[in-house]
Image: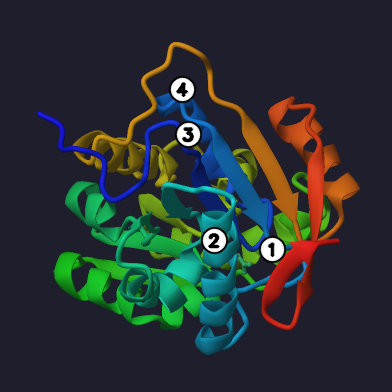
């Protein structure tokens, strides 16, 4: 049974999704597969990437302004496709915008803890995520009897933003993080940053096939689908949805990455920050 659409929102409105940069594209990819009829607004805050090393208050302020922008463009649901922004702002956003449903990210410690055979799990995430209370609560609730090995992978987000997915420097960052974890017998790696699924091939080449890598994007897409269905806001089809891309960084650079990673030819709209407001550049 579905409920009536909440407030004045309607099923034909788009989903808004944001990240500090190109990481959220890993979530967008899953959303497109799970919800092909939905139109989507994707916003990359590349003027401020990386979020990970920034104070949580700053990331919270960016996240609130981005949410306001996406709502002004007609978004009916917001996917915070960024672990750092979820750590910093998810709770605040739900309080500040009570009429809107949010889907956030948290490191997938629960499925990892449930399936590990060695009781050693690796978590790759940025400092903002590892320091946030969301992560602490996930570890406290679900990691009983499991040793968690964390690494903030300094420089990895920047490498991925540059499109340097198979460069020696990217491999060096991952080897430094993963080798001590492998020596400690991890059999599962949780990707706690939406940028990292783009280096899964390199992670696998370092860890071998015996280590399971958990990308939370499909679970996040399923959660968005459940919320839309339950609130009567799911786009009915049959026409495929469209995606509109925005960046506070270089539109040309984002268009290049979209083409090379997703095979998508898209017009990207450039935005500029004016104090804490996003405006057309
Ligand atoms: N993709 C992000 C995350 O999931 C943010 C990375 C960053 O900007 O530091 O945490």
Q: Which residue is mark 2?
A: 178
Regarding mark 1 in the picture, which secondary structure is present there? loop
Q: Are marks 3 and 1 in contact (CB under 8 Å)?
A: no
Q: Quadrant of residue 230?
A: top left
Of the image marks 1 and 4, the number of the one nearer the N terminus: 4
* Front position in the image: 261 or 204: 261
**Tag 4 or tag 3, which sits nearer the N-term?**
3
Tell me how far mark 2 sits from mark 3, CA to CA: 26 Å
Q: Which residue is mark 4?
A: 37
Residue that appears at 44% across and 45% down = 215
Q: Which residue is mark 1?
A: 45
The residue at which mark 3 appears reads as 30
* As drawn, 105 above or below 57: above
Precedes in sequence: disc 1 or disc 2:
1
Secondary structure beneath label 3:
helix
Q: Report x, y in % for residue 239.
A: 51, 14
For discs 1 and 2, the disc positioned in front in the rendered view:
1
Q: Residues within 10 Å of mark 4 (few under 14, many from 20)?
A: some
Of helix, strand and loop, which one carries label 2? helix
Q: Quadrant of the C terminus?
A: bottom right
């Amino acid at each position: 049974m579905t409920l009536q659409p909440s407030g004045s929102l309607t099923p034909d409105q788009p989903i808004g999704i944001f990240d500090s940069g190109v990481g959220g594209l890993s979530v967008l990819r899953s959303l497109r597969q799970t919800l092909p009829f939905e139109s989507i607004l994707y916003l990359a805050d590349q003027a401020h990437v990386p979020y990970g090393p920034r104070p949580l208050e700053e990331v919270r302020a960016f996240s609130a302004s981005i949410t306001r922008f996406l709502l002004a463009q007609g978004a009916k649901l917001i996917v915070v496709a960024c672990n750092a922004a979820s750590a910093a702002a998810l709770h605040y956003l739900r309080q500040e915008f009570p009429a809107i449903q949010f889907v956030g990210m948290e490191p997938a410690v629960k499925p990892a803890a449930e399936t590990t055979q060695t009781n050693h799990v690796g978590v790759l995430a940025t400092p903002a995520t590892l320091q946030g209370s969301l992560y602490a609560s996930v570890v406290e609730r679900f990691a009983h009897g499991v040793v968690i090995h964390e690494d903030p992978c300094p420089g990895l987000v920047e490498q991925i933003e540059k499109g340097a997915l198979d460069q020696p420097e990217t491999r060096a960052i991952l080897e430094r993080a993963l080798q001590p974890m492998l020596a400690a017998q991890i059999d599962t790696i949780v990707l706690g940053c939406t940028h990292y699924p783009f280096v899964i091939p390199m992670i696998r080449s370092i860890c071998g096939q015996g280590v399971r890598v958990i990308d939370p994007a499909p679970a996040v897409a399923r959660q968005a689908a459940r919320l839309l269905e339950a609130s009567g806001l799911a786009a009915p089809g049959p026409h495929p949805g469209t995606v509109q891309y925005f960046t506070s960084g270089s539109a040309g650079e984002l268009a290049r990455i979209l083409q090379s990673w997703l095979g998508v030819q898209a017009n990207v709209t450039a935005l500029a920050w004016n104090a804490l407001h996003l405006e057309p550049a």
